[in-house]
Image (cartoon, coloured by chain):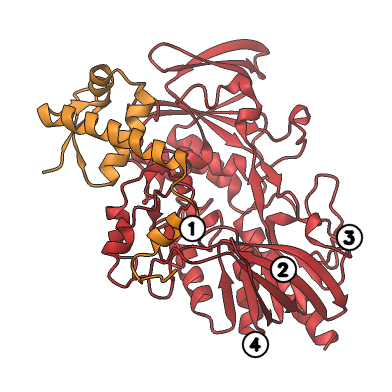
Chain colours: A red, B orange
Amino acid sequence: MKDSLKSSSYDALVIGAGIAGGEAALNLANTGYKVLLVDKELSVGGKMIMLSKVFPTLDCAACITTPKVSEISRHPNITIFTGSEVSNIRKISDNEFVAKVTRKPRYVHVEDCTACQLCEKACPTSVRDQYQFGLIGRKAAFIPFSICSPKAAAIDIDNCTLCGACERVCPTHCIDFTMETETNELHVKTIVVATGFNLFDPNNIPRYGYGKYKNVITAMQMEREIAPTRPFHTILRPGDGKVPDKIAYVLCVGSRDATVGNPICSQICCMYSIKQAQLLMGALPMADVTIYYINIRSFGKGFEEFYQQAKGMGVNFVKGKIGRISEKENGNLILRYEDINKGKLQEAEHDMVILSTGVLPTKGIDGLFENETLTLDQFSFVGQSDMLASPAKTSIGGVFVAGAATGPMDIPDSILSAGAASSEAISYIIQHA
Amino acid sequence: MEIEKGKTAKYLREKSGGVPEQAKENLKEFNRIKKLMLEALAQEDLTIKQLTDKLNMPSDEVVYHLMSLVKYGLVATGDVDDMDEYFTYKLKK
């Protein structure tokens, strides 16, 4: 593809448009600064917009996220680049950074798209939907998900057969296959890194059978199954479409586990599993839900009460470390585990297993900077140079960090962290004006 | 090359020298499975287990494709069985 180079200036560049990046961008924009908010995905909202509910209040995640996302999208001081990646950041002086932002073509003029979905209906192709974590298909011409922002179609060019059916039915002629990759050179005064986290890939622990046994899924897949914008009409086993009635959660999958290179606690897995267990008991009143844990870490406000509430609802908690999962012919799963309290090896049969995967750092952030070194901590999260007095400061003056880019944290802590980062960034701009 | 608005797919097809083989194969496979499923459901309403047996396909593949057809509006969900375990699926009229 031919690149076109555009140059522009903003007060702040916020990398990552999840809940932390969005909050930081809003704070900066509300103070009167021009912000460029960049995300590699096709929508802002990060991981939070994909969740069903939040713990421990059980508030609807979309009901919290969508007004915020809408505010971000409509803010006159915020420019959003989705489907874009930042690279080659150079610090020129104390109040000038130059960054390269590459915008991949969406093949849809977002401002003209009415999200009528006629292109989706006309598209003959079906591929696995990454926003439903592969549980269901989507078209090559598609709206990423129903509450995405910008609410506009996109073309998955790798899976498109270029038949032109989408173009023919588009009432606003907003589909444009002549769009090309754009490279933007940005001049900014400060940068907020809000690149969030990755989830551990359970394929790296073969003994749990993820990928091999179809009724072993991740908690993020279950999150989609219980969300209002769910892939199936109800909660089903992906292996055979059965409504499950004996569900197991395995905690600390890829966290607190030095053998997979991630010795730290993910801080959110206990609570999101307990949240899902409660939601499952509401959705499937006859189901038995068992949580296999090493320790329940209910450290936050209302967390212990939330844990006790789950117990009171009948969620079964077993202090046990899973050794191996195997599959029966009927798709049920046998969990072989060490019952820590009894000091015995036990086996239990479940018809669906959910792996509560741990939090990992986003890779490659330190490589974004050309002439400065962004120091990472020992676990490869962005290092905080003054954690107590100034938690958003990094090793580079003028570059601040927000949310789970600094380490595992829940949504309220991410928002607090974003507040700190935006305040520091504003202060930096004022000091270096 | 003059590019006509609303016909830009042709432009990219010609520019990139055709359609990627993988995309063509995916489409062919989806159409084959869709046809098989819709033909089977045209005869009678079926559960995923019955469809799996009838089409001789892995059950997880049946779930994936059938749920996609539900999403695309071609198949509707029917009743659940007496054990509240498996739903029946039918063609959308």
Rounded to the nearest whole Å, what is the CA distance between mark 3 and mark 1? 41 Å
How far apart marks 3 and 2 lie (CA) works out to: 17 Å
Residue pointed to by mark 2:
A100
Quadrant in which the C terminus of chain A is drawn: bottom right
Mark 3 element type: loop
Task: Say what amino acid the circle numbered 2 marks.
Answer: Lys
State the image quarter where residue A360 is shown.
top right
**Three-letter code, disc 1:** Lys
| Residue ID for mark 4 | A32
Front label number (4 vs 3): 3
Residue A373's disc is 3
Vertical comparison of A8 with B37: above or below: below
Whether tag 4 and tag 3 are in contact, CB under 8 A, the answer is: no
Q: Determine if marks 3 and 1 fall on one subunit.
A: no
Q: Which residue is drawn at 58% across and 36% down?
A: A356
- Element type at mark 4: loop
